[in-house]
């Protein structure tokens, strides 16, 4: 009986090691450990073992049984977890293509805008989003007690510190440290206490432009914005000025592009006017130039500003500004 148990153990080791899949392993288990298997047959033969030999034979039988059960469990674990043999990589799984990221539509629009102005000889300037009262209002020629200074319109950190409501603050910082000529565009995030709806947000992005040099006129401003209109929306897009007021420019204007949806004929999006308001612009007020140490008798300049969200919405036919900040991948993956 002891010889039979040793032979069974030897054959069992070889059989379990040669099982190459779960089906083959199950067949080996049934053959050795099943109800009608070889181990069960030897167990029946224990009855014929002499009484004095039964303790030794019984002990060996239990050892062989435990060995065979352990061999089965180890081989089962090995076959069911191939990743463990390949350093964490399950080579039996189908390949998975990596998910590629996409640029946010606001950032792609900003890149296109900067590309246009860099091609026109402008440089990019940036500045802090948290500003003091001087750069936020005083240096921009805001009169005392202007409505924009009210806490209902501007986010204040404390009495003298605020979140910038426009990137014009950077224009002041640049002119303080740069002698004319100055040719910059200023992109950045801005904040205003607007009620969030389909066309307004308390947080938005703006692009401003500034050019200061000798002999600069309103005609130079118009020509630059005409180039911007055609580069963004095609050669048939035109630009229009309408009188407006801003504390830091004089004269000032609102500029609009011909409607890109109806080509200026009038539609629901442009309210039948054929024009889409884009932003504000004008000649830099002499008080602003003198405040930063630039001789307003010698130098003139112009400035403009508009919301990047506005341009992105027109380019892509987006009707709700909140979609830009929703984080909804169904919306973002379209671009």
Image (cartoon, grey):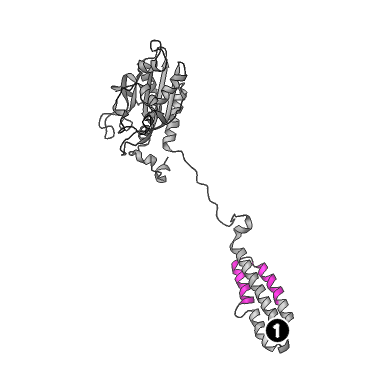
Residue pointed to by mark 1:
55
As drawn, 173 above or below 101: above
Residue 61 part of the magenta-drawn span: no
Q: Which residues are magenta?
A: 8-33
Residue 217's image quarter?
top left
Query: Would residue 48 appear left or right of 185 to someone viewing this image?
Result: right
- Residue 240 rendering spot, x and y as whole percentages: 31, 23
Relative to residue 86, is residue 130 depicted above or below?
above
Q: Nearer the viewer, residue 309 or 204?
A: 204
Magenta: main secondary structure: helix
User: Which residue is drawn at the image coordinates 71% and 89% (left, top)?
Assistant: 51
Residue at the (61%, 58%) spot, across then down: 84
Q: Is residue 31 magenta?
A: yes
| Viewport quadrant of the C terminus | top left
Location of residue 41 in the rendering, given as x and y in whole percent from the top left corner? 65, 82
Q: Residue furthest right?
A: 3
Residue 46: quadrant of the picture:
bottom right
């Amino acid at each position: 009986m002891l010889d039979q148990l040793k032979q069974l153990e030897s054959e069992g080791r070889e059989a379990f090691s040669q099982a190459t899949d779960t089906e083959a392993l199950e067949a080996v288990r049934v053959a050795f450990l099943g109800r009608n298997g070889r181990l069960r047959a030897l167990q029946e033969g224990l009855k014929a073992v002499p009484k004095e030999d039964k303790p030794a034979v019984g002990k060996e039988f239990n050892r062989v049984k435990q060995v065979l059960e352990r061999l089965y469990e180890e081989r089962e674990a090995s076959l069911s977890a191939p990743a463990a043999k390949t350093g964490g990589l399950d080579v039996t799984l189908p390949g998975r293509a990596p998910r590629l990221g996409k640029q946010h539509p606001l950032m792609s629009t900003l890149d296109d805008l900067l590309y246009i102005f860099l091609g026109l000889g402008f440089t990019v300037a940036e500045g802090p989003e948290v500003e003091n009262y001087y750069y936020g209002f005083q240096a921009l020629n805001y009169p005392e007690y202007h409505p924009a200074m009210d806490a209902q319109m501007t986010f204040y950190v404390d009495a003298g510190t605020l979140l910038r409501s426009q990137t014009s603050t950077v224009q002041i910082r640049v002119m303080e440290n740069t002698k004319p000529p100055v040719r910059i565009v200023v992109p950045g995030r801005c904040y205003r206490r607007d009620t969030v709806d389909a066309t307004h947000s308390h947080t938005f992005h703006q692009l401003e432009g500034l050019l200061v040099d000798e002999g600069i006129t309103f005609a130079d401003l118009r020509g630059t914005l005409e180039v911007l209109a055609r580069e963004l929306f095609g050669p048939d897009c035109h630009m229009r000025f309408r009188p407006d007021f801003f504390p830091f420019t004089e004269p000032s204007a609102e500029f609009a592009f011909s409607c890109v949806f109806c080509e200026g004929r009038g539609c629901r999006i442009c309210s039948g006017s054929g024009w889409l308001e884009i932003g504000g612009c004008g000649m830099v007020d002499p008080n602003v130039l003198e405040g930063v140490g630039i001789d307003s008798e010698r130098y003139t300049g112009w400035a403009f500003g508009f919301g990047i969200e506005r341009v992105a919405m027109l380019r892509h036919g987006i009707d709700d500004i909140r979609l830009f900040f929703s984080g909804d991948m169904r919306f973002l993956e379209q671009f």
